[in-house]
Image (cartoon, grey):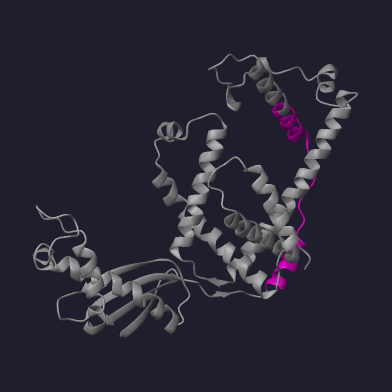
Amino acid sequence: MKTEIKKLENAQIEITVVLPHKDLEKQRDTVTKEALKNVEVDGFRKGQVPEEMALKKINPMKILEEMAQQAISSVYMDIITTEEIKAIGQPEIMITKIAEGSDLEFKITTAVLPEVTLPDYKSISKVENKKEYSEEVDEEELKSALLNLRKMRAQQEEAKNLTEGQTPKSWNDVDEKDLPELSEDWVKTMGDFESLDGFKEKIKENLVLEKKSKNVEKIRISTVDAILEKSDIEVPEMMTQYEVDKMMHEFEHNITMTGMDFDEYLTSIKKTRDEYKKEWHGQGYKRAQTQLLLNKIAADEKIDPSDDEVNAEVTKIMEQYKDQKGIDENNVRAYVATVLSHQKVFEFLGKQ
């Protein structure tokens, strides 16, 4: 068997293979016997047709094509192992030459685990961690937060009075005249508050905490962007598409949460899912790059969540979705381990 490997874009390779005719012929008996089982001839039960008669009913090219598929399957892992190829995902296989008595020629295109070359991410993190962002909350921000709380309470009150079949107004459709008055009496219904000023002060404190949390996220984003800018990370297309599909799922969920059917929403703005996916391709590529970057730092710095941490989170998730079918615990465990690992990487970078 002869193989030739060619590097392609987006962390893919193309393997050209010439499989000797004698190796292809090893599949003939198995393939022919299987084909004979399915031959049907009037007067005979299926699988009981005399071999000489059944062979006349079988298309020789179909036998040859099935032999090729079996042969390719049998040698694929040998090629990957021998050539030390770190393949990921399902390969694309194209037969380029097939004929009786001839060698089989085909091409395998597969994504491979990309090489990730990072800069001095510790030094970059030190620079980004020194950046400061405001934690002050101005009057407009406080006013907006209070308006949102009044809208939320108006929706809750409306929901209590709906009859079966009725749906509550969407967030944007809540009329200002339906909002509760921002008064001393009203704030007492929102919790243990003695005055309107006390309520406003608590909301302001919460907004400050929210800003602090967002500022941490801003530094994390700027750190990743700065590291990516000096990194060499080629992303397989399948990883980009996976991230784009996740983005589409998140987007659909968010639209549905507003009470609007997602397909109706797409119709109203005259867009399709495919158009969104094309627009998000660059963002999906960057998200995949970020995943590979975080994985590389975790590996280099030996950052791993403990078994106890993973088990505790898996238990929570499995309990939360115990009534939902199709939840595979092994998949949940892999997801949790990745999320916790990335969290620890961000904590590590934040301490530089």
User: Is residue 20 in view?
Assistant: no
With respect to residue 281, does 177 lie above or below? above
Q: Which residue shows up at 74% across the image and 58% down it? A: 309
Percent across and percent down for residue 135 are 79, 46
Q: Which quadrant of the view contains residue 331?
A: bottom right
- From the viewer's side, name the closer residue of 5 and 169: 5
Q: Is residue 211 left or right of residue 46?
A: right
> Quadrant of the rendered structure where residue 263 is?
top left
Q: Position of residue 162 (x, y in %)?
A: 60, 15
Query: Front-most of 346 and 163?
Result: 163
Q: What residue is shown at x 69% (from left), y 51% (from top)?
A: 315
Q: Position of residue 18 (x, y in %)?
A: 27, 82
Report the quarter where the N terminus lies: bottom left
Could you tell me how many numbered marks the image carries? Answer: 0
**Is residue 166 visible in the rendered structure shown here?**
yes
Left or right of 102: which side holds 184?
right
Q: Which residues are magenta?
A: 121-148
Q: Position of residue 17 (x, y in %)?
A: 30, 80
Relative height, residue 52 to residue 18 (above, below): above
Residue at 40 percent across and 70 percent down: it is 110
Q: Quadrant of residue 228?
A: bottom right
Magenta residue check for 123: yes
Q: Is residue 85 left or right of residue 100?
A: right
| Residue 26 among those drawn in magenta | no
Q: Is residue 269 left or right of residue 294?
A: left
Residue 235 higher or lower than 106, as above or below: above
Give the main secondary structure of the magenta stretch. Answer: helix
